[in-house]
Image (cartoon, rainbow, N blue to C red):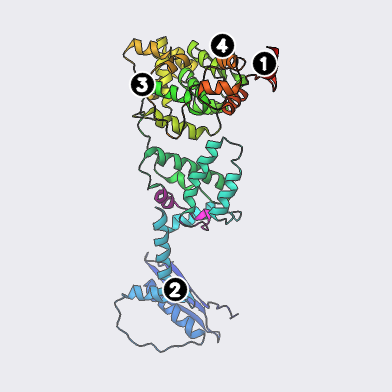
Amino acid sequence: MGKKSVERFILKDFENRSGTRSWRVTGSWPDGTRERTNFEDRGDAIEHKARIEKEAGGRREAYQLSRTALSREELVDAENALAISGKQSLSEMVTHYLKLQKDVADCSNLNLDQAMAFFRNHYSAEIEELSIYVARERFLGTRRNLEATTVRHYESATRLLLSPDPNKFVHQFTVKDIDKMLGKYKNLNSFNTNRRGINVFFNWAVRYHLCMENPCLRMDKPIRPESHIAILSPDEVRRLLKASLLMNDGVSAATIAIFLFAGLRPSELQDLKPEDIKSERIRVVGGKLRRKLKRSVQISPVLKAWLDEYPFRGLPSGWDYKRRKLKDVTKAENWVSDILRHTSISYQLERDQDQGKVAFVNGTSAGVIDQHYRDVIDDPEVVKAFWLLTPKQVLSEEIELDLKKARVIEWPTDALLAKLVWEKPLSRLAVDLNITDSAIRKRCIKRKIELPRNGYWQKQKSAL
């Protein structure tokens, strides 16, 4: 390492008796001679100090005049900057400084000094440099105890963070990065849904010291989409109910009936268990209001008719697929989110004429109903007919359905089927119903309908 340079001379300012200011260069030369020189101009004093420092260090230089556009003060300033810059050139220093200024301006609205202040206040040696790919896997691993639909939402939203570069560090993401990812979504609901998922991820990342701040917090406030209130028309309701009866042996019938005639939320129905359905009421303990609100929903006569014929055994397997198929068969012109709940609450209001009661029963408020759920049904006869749509009534109506890739089987009720299987062998009953005896056996097992044991019909024949 080279020797550290020692300044032999110092520059001081002082006030004259006349009130003016002067500058004095003082110090000692190598031979012991004292230096004490006064200047009226500070620039002259700085220039003199720089020159004699070089001379005292054995670096006497011959000066020659050169053309320059710099003023005397600028030349003195440049020489002083060179004296403190060491071996680095002034042009390199200025270029580097301007580049830092540009980099800060590109990713924030701060200047360089503000950015450095933010860095000093927020930087922590505990920040872990982790790629977005690895961080996302860790994050999703902490979400496994949530509802399946919520987990899928987080998987979908955070997948957007992988598209630019899966090896990019979490702490390198900026507001501009998030804006660019979400910019492709023109639908406000899609935009806000993905933004919420990304926001949850970065909140998690801040807590686990993977980044200093959540970039979503500095984005513009999300735009709230306009509320679209829509309910199913009477024909759409009938198509939906009949399709639920005919598709897959009616496994979705109880679920659709509870949606339409009890007004439960999708999340509440997902958490609903068979033991929550009593003889006269449904006890709602899950859904989005889990652990905050429990309520009891009275089972109306029409819903009781559905649950008697098609007992609720939980959401059917593959419910998301079945729900989409039912939606297609319904041919609803304007299917919006929660349209079944909209429909149920609207018909409850027309039936009861009591907004406070309906809000209480459905676990919401009158204001939310007015803003998000309520539509007006003008014809009282339509309202009356809605609450009479029992399975028997729906099956008796001539309703055109487009059930592609699925054979429509009009099964007898469970009570009738339980009687028929004891009147003749399954092979003969299958001919009457135009189905296979294997299909009858499977339905009876699913519906817990007792079947004659093997050899029963042979014994009956021999007894004759």
- Going by the numbered disc 4, the residue's amino acid type is Glu
Q: Which residue is mark 3?
A: 235
Whether 256 is among the magenta residues is no
Q: Which mark is residue 24?
A: 2
Report, in whole angstroms, how far the alpha carbon at label 2 lies from the one at label 1: 133 Å
Seen at 42% across and 24% down, the residue is: 240
**Taking 333 as reference, is 171 left or right?**
right
Residue 208 in view in this figure: no
Residue 438 in view in this figure: yes
Seen at 39% across and 57% down, the residue is: 106
Helix, strand or loop for disc 1:
helix
Q: Are marks 1 and 3 in contact (CB under 8 Å)?
A: no
**Taking 404 as reference, is 143 left or right?**
right
188 vs 107: above or below? above
Helix, strand or loop for disc 4:
loop
Report, in whole angstroms, how far the alpha carbon at label 4 lies from the one at label 2: 102 Å
Q: Which mark is residue 280?
A: 4
335 vs 415: above or below? below
Q: Position of residue 307 (x, y in %)?
A: 54, 17
Q: Position of residue 443 (x, y in %)?
A: 58, 25
Looking at marks 3 and 2 on the same chain, the residue that comes earlier in the sequence is marked by 2
Looking at marks 1 and 3 on the same chain, the residue that comes earlier in the sequence is marked by 3
Report, in whole angstroms, how far the alpha carbon at label 1 lies from the one at label 3: 50 Å
- Going by the numbered disc 1, the residue's amino acid type is Lys
The label nearer to you, 3 versus 2, is 3
Looking at marks 4 and 3 on the same chain, the residue that comes earlier in the sequence is marked by 3
Tell me how many marks there are.
4
Q: Which residue is mark 1?
A: 461
Q: Residues within 10 Å of mark 4 (few under 14, many from 20)?
A: few
Helix, strand or loop for disc 2:
strand
The label nearer to you, 2 versus 1, is 1
